[in-house]
Image (cartoon, rainbow, N blue to C red):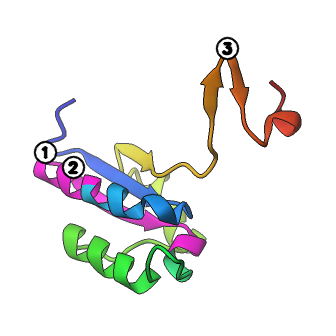
């Protein structure tokens, strides 16, 4: 997919252990010509973890994109109605799924069915 001129919303959720591998992908999108709108969930924006301080991740992302991170529902609401993005990446996904023998195996199976 050609990304030149595409507006990509890049949202980080609270899977802190994958941030170090996920954040460089924002740079790759920009290198491929995309304009990246950074978005972080409340937890990923505010919580420090054993994988790093939230302020450090915020600084990296804002430096890479040159944009302030959207981190509140109020600030995120205009994204859809104002057509601010062409594509939305939600990375990393917080739920872990394993595909084995044609069924989803995870701790949510009983709540969501097999």
The percent position of residue 62, horizontal first and vertical second, equals 28, 75
Q: Residue 75 — which label? A: none
Q: Is residue 27 above or below residue 56?
A: above
Give the structural element (helix, strand or loop) at label 1: loop
The percent position of residue 69, horizontal first and vertical second, equals 38, 73
Cα separation between marks 2 and 3: 34 Å
Q: Is residue 84 visible?
A: no
Cα separation between marks 2 and 1: 5 Å
Q: Is residue 96 above or below residue 57?
A: above
Residue at left 53%, top 82%?
48
Which residue position holds label 3? Answer: 101
Which residue position holds label 2? Answer: 29
Q: Point out the stretch of residues depicted in magenta.
A: 25-44
The answer to whether residue 18 is left or right of residue 13 is left
Q: Earlier in the sequence, mark 3 or mark 1?
A: 1
Would you identify the image quadrant in which residue 54 lies? bottom left
Which residue position holds label 1? Answer: 32
In front: 106, or 71? 106
Q: Earlier in the sequence, mark 2 or mark 3?
A: 2
The percent position of residue 2, horizontal first and vertical second, equals 17, 33
For residue 29: magenta? yes
């Amino acid at each position: 997919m050609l990304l030149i001129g595409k507006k990509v919303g890049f949202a980080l959720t609270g899977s802190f252990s994958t941030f170090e591998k996920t954040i460089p992908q924002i740079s790759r999108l920009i290198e491929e010509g995309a304009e990246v709108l950074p978005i972080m969930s409340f937890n990923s924006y505010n919580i420090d973890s054993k994988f790093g301080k939230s302020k450090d991740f915020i600084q990296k992302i804002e430096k890479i994109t040159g944009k302030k991170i959207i981190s509140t529902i109020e600030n995120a609401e205009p994204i859809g109605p104002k057509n601010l993005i062409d594509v939305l990446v939600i990375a990393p996904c917080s739920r872990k799924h394993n595909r084995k023998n044609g069924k989803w195996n995870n701790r949510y199976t009983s709540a969501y069915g097999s």
